[in-house]
Image (cartoon, grey):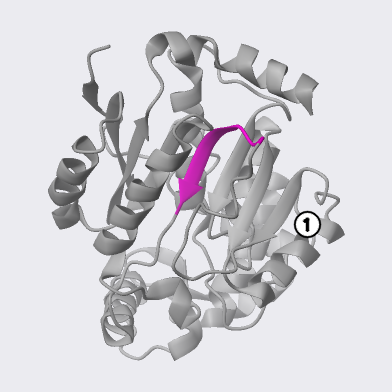
Amino acid sequence: MKKTENAAQNTGTTHPRNKYQGRYDWSVLRDIRPQLSQWIVQHEKAGETLMFSEPGAVIELNKALIHQYYGIEQWDLAEGYLCPPIPGRADYIHHVADLLAEGGSVPTGPTVRCLDIGIGASAIYPIIGHSEYQWSWIGSDIDEKALRSSGAILEKNGLSNSIRLRLQDSKDLIFYGIIRKNDLFDAVVCNPPFHSSLQEALAGTQRKVTNLSGAREIKQNFEGKEHELVTPGGEKQFIHRYMQESRRYFRQVLWFTVLVSKEDHLRYLKNKLKSMNPIEIRVIEMAQGNKKSRILAWTYQTVHERNEWQWRKQMASQEE
């Protein structure tokens, strides 16, 4: 089978199925979370906006959004952990859904099984994926406290049976010990640490917060724990390792995907990936406001094998 490489059809705008389409409705969000009012200020050009430099403001915004969009009433993030931007996370999930659709309808229901590498303390990708498409999930992390935080969120919202957690015992491994012998996953998602040092991470956070609100000072815990942000060699080396490990599980995963924050890394990563002989590589462009990113996706399954994927999953479930 000839290997192919496809650019995304998306033009870099918000995915059409994303519930967030351009601006927050502050009046609705205030009704959901009255505590949010203290963080909303008047901007001379933009009108009402949030004090994005304040960790408490971002957390309250997320609590309101995740309730408004996904019906999650209790979402208490462990202190100091990464507070994810909900609209951008939703875009990732919707693009993964398009991959699984293969030009047809998006598969829904709990028989669609996904893996989140680095679920963190918020469980945000599985929450969105389950809410939008009723997929079932495994979420992994190297941080036991983060898993306890995610576990508490899932339990409070009745999601523990649909989203299960696994601890990665080794900081040097990604899939080994997480993907088990009889596991079959329709997709893997991953939002890797972006930076090679804490200083680089703080500088990146400062730029983002300044762009959002004009603030010149930030609190160090605004962007999460160090291991959520920093990895030796930065995202380029992490993703390279992720791609290398993916080859071992080529029969157990339909689509591997990973978020690439830095465009400069994309050519290097694609070249490395080609040497690992996937059947198909895709790059999906995404944008939320001024922030641009892309999903790198690949599969080791031929078109014929992809068409038989559901049959393989049925056979595997009967053998369990």
- Secondary structure at badge 1 equals helix
The majority secondary structure of the magenta stretch comes to: strand
The percent position of residue 65, horizontal first and vertical second, equals 62, 56
Quadrant where the image shows the C terminus: top right
Q: Is residue 201 above or below residue 141?
A: below
Residue interval drawn in magenta = 182-190
Q: Residue 184: say if magenta.
A: yes
**The quadrant where residue 276 appears:** top left
Residue 114 in magenta? no
Residue 89 visible in image: yes
Q: Which residue is mark 1?
A: 154
Q: Tell me the amino acid under the disc marked 1.
A: Leu
Indicate left or right for 176 with 134 as reference: left
Q: Position of residue 275 (x, y in %)?
A: 19, 38
- In the image, residue 215 above or below residue 262: below
Report the residue at 47% width, 34% height from top.
Answer: 96
Observer-nearest of 259 and 15: 259
In the shown orientation, is residue 202 left or right of residue 97?
left
Q: Residue at x 21, y 48 (%)?
A: 269
In the figure, 137 relative to 49: above or below? above
Residue 216, quarter of the rendered image: bottom left
